[in-house]
Amino acid sequence: MLEAVGYWFNDRAPSGYPRPQKLVATWEPVQRKAVVAYLRAGLTLETYRGKSHCRFACGEQDMGHRDYTDGVFAWPEGLPHYVEKHAVRLPDHFVAHALSGTPPVEPKVKRIDDRPWLRWGVAQDATVELTGWDALGWEDQKKVLERLHARIAPGHPLHQKELEVLVGRRSTDELLVLLPDGTMAVVRLSDASTRLFASWDEWLPRSLPTGC
């Protein structure tokens, strides 16, 4: 299988992938330029309909819609942007491979293994702790939002706000929701107790205290 590199956490679809904001580092300029060139010279592995977006919200619109490969690794088409424009670092063994001069080859197997990438992200403290939190299906989202809105009274910070459910935690009866302005909230379904935070940088996966 091909080893994944450069697949990022999506704010609106939380996962175990690392956040590139946590991986900004100082690169040696020549090495950085060579790695960017290597990434751009990859072979097309897969093409998708939808386009990606920069997780730094820098305004770059052309982040690609393909996966690339060199026969050993697989990465998204937009990965060179993160290295070149945002100085995001990558695993040392990938950088060494990219600088080795080994030419890309067509892979015999096109399946991608993201387990090493996930482990590396955890080791770099670049992931979001989501243990116990799970995505909800569309029907479940509708049900919990109806239940939540029935408990939100005027004056509540979520009153009359259009909410998007990101994940839920059954053990504490809580939801993580996205607000229209991009901020987020953890809210308990039983009493609508709420904790607001501006971004994933403020995320702490604790449950709400009683009476919040």
Image (cartoon, grey):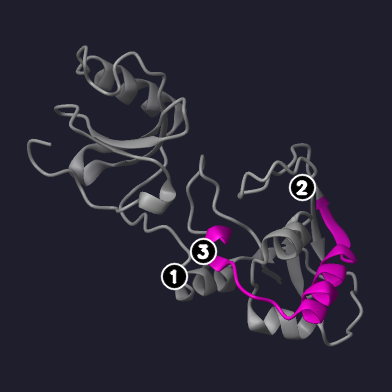
Whether tag 1 and tag 2 are in contact, CB under 8 A, the answer is no
Point out which mark residue 87 bears. none
Q: Are marks 3 and 2 in contact (CB under 8 Å)?
A: no
In this picture, residue 182 sits left or right of residue 78: left
| Mark sitting on residue 63 | 2
Task: Pick whichever, 101 or 202, lies toward us.
Answer: 202
Q: How crowded is mark 1: few (under 14 residues within 10 Å), some or many (20 or more)?
A: some
How packed mark 2 is, by other alpha carbons closer than 10 Å (few <14, some 14-19, many 20 or more), is: some
Q: Name the residue under label 1.
A: 125
Left or right, 64 with reference to 129: right
Expressed as whole percent of the image width and height from the top left, the position of residue 82 reads 70, 60
Q: Do the residues labelled 1 and 3 touch (CB within 8 Å)?
A: yes
**Kind of residue at disc 2:** Met
The answer to whether 19 is drawn above or below residue 210 in the figure is below
- Mark 3–mark 2 Cα distance, whole angstroms, equals 20 Å
Secondary-structure class at tag 2? loop
The spot of residue 54 in percent (x, y) is: 67, 47
31 in the magenta segment: yes
Quadrant of the image occupied by residue 175: top left
**What is the span of residues highlighted in magenta in the rendered image?**
18-46
Q: Assign a secondary structure to mark 3.
A: helix
Residue farthest along the left direction in this orientation: 211
Which sits in the foreground, 29 or 115? 29
Residue at the location (44% across, 70% down)? 125
Q: Tell me where residue 66 appears, x and y as whole percent.
A: 80, 51
Q: Which residue is drawn at 54% across and 53% down?
A: 9
Of mark 1 and mark 3, the one earlier in the sequence is 3
User: Where 101 sits versus 174, above or below?
Assistant: below
**One can see residue 71 in this view:** no
Q: Which mark is residue 22?
A: 3
Q: The N terminus appears in which quarter of the rendering?
A: bottom right
